Amino acid sequence: MTTTILLIILGLAMIIIGAHFLVTGSSRIASRFGISDIIIGMTIVAIGTSAPEMVVSFMGAMKGSVGLSVGNILGSNICNILLIIGLSSIIYPMTVSRINVNRDMQFMLLSTVVLILVSLDAQIETLTIDDQMTGNVISRTEGIILLLFFLVFMFYSFASAKRHEEATKESEEKKEKEEEKPVVKKNFLLSLVMFLGGLAVLIWGGNILVDNATILARAKGVSDTLIGATIVAIGTSLPELAASVMAACQKKVGIAIGNVIGSNIFNVFLILGGCATVTQLPLATVNHVHFIFLLLATLLFLVSARTSFKIRRIEGLMLFVLYILYIIVTISLA
């Protein structure tokens, strides 16, 4: 059992390290081909911070541990809001921009509502997986619908980024002329090695984590969903936690807010949608409590941000306490 826990920790470490090198390498490659920082941030970096959840969820789905996949997404999104935003706001009150409230947070709320609708719909299908009869599922059709929502979000975000890029292009050109700094060319081969190496370590670590988390769940007699929503969810959210807390310490709250919002949207529309497209996701082991806490967390986050365009320390403390309550309730119902 000790070996299993150590391998879970090793898998998490490999996922985080792999994601770091994947994002760094791919960002350098994109820069080499003249892709703007805004586009890089909205695609490569945004997907990169969700890479741990992506690998764990896809590996879980492909290996038959679908409870781990769904639990990881639900647990990660709850962790992102209640734990990460909560802790970050306690460290430094977080000012929320109007574009975050009027566009990004609306998409995040939409992703939560759509997830609940496709998860708790009236459709009952009987599937046989590992000789267990299951009921409600996220079907392949619903997975495709989630992916279509992701494409809409990306199209809208790219259009907004393009407008912002054109508006700031002239001022940036003037700044570059004034500074007249020499252009430093990145080593393309090194960037490619970082990208491929990071991807390999990410996948390898995902395999180790999923296999041993499943072993631990069965040995302790608990569901894959519980392990996915707690241990694995916190582990795969470590990149977002580290980035957001560090940003809060440096008073760069925009990074922390955007990091969480983007991650939650990607987790539902891209990752869960992709997993459901690959294989239908039975929800027999997923307790409704997870969906209730996710909706509550999302609404609290949105209301707090819209009220004063700021997440104050007291509100951050409330979010953090709610996360502790979520963990206690989840474990007690296991």
Image (spheres, rainbow, N blue to C red):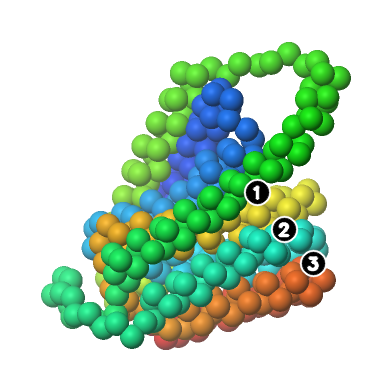
Could you tell me which quadrant the C terminus lies in? bottom left
CA–CA distance in space, label 2 to label 3 = 11 Å
Residue at position x 46%, y 18% from top?
189
CA–CA distance in space, label 3 to label 1 = 21 Å
Q: Nearer the viewer, residue 256 or 235?
A: 256
Q: What x and y, as percent, mark residue 259? A: 62, 54
Residue at position x 35%, y 61% from top?
144
Does label 3 or label 1 sit earlier along the sequence? 1
Label annotation for residue 25: none
The quarter of the picture where residue 238 lies is bottom right
Left or right of 245? Residue 69 is left
Q: Nearer the viewer, mark 2 or mark 1?
A: 1
Q: What residue is pinned by disc 3?
A: 309
CA–CA distance in space, label 2 to label 1 = 10 Å
Q: What residue is pinned by disc 2?
A: 99
Q: Nearer the viewer, residue 145 or 58?
A: 145
Amino acid type at circle 2 is Ile
Q: Nearer the viewer, residue 90 or 217?
A: 90
Q: What x and y, as percent, mark residue 239? A: 56, 51
Does label 2 or label 1 sit earlier along the sequence? 2
Callout 3: few (<14), some (14-19), or many (20+) C-alpha neighbours within 10 Å? some
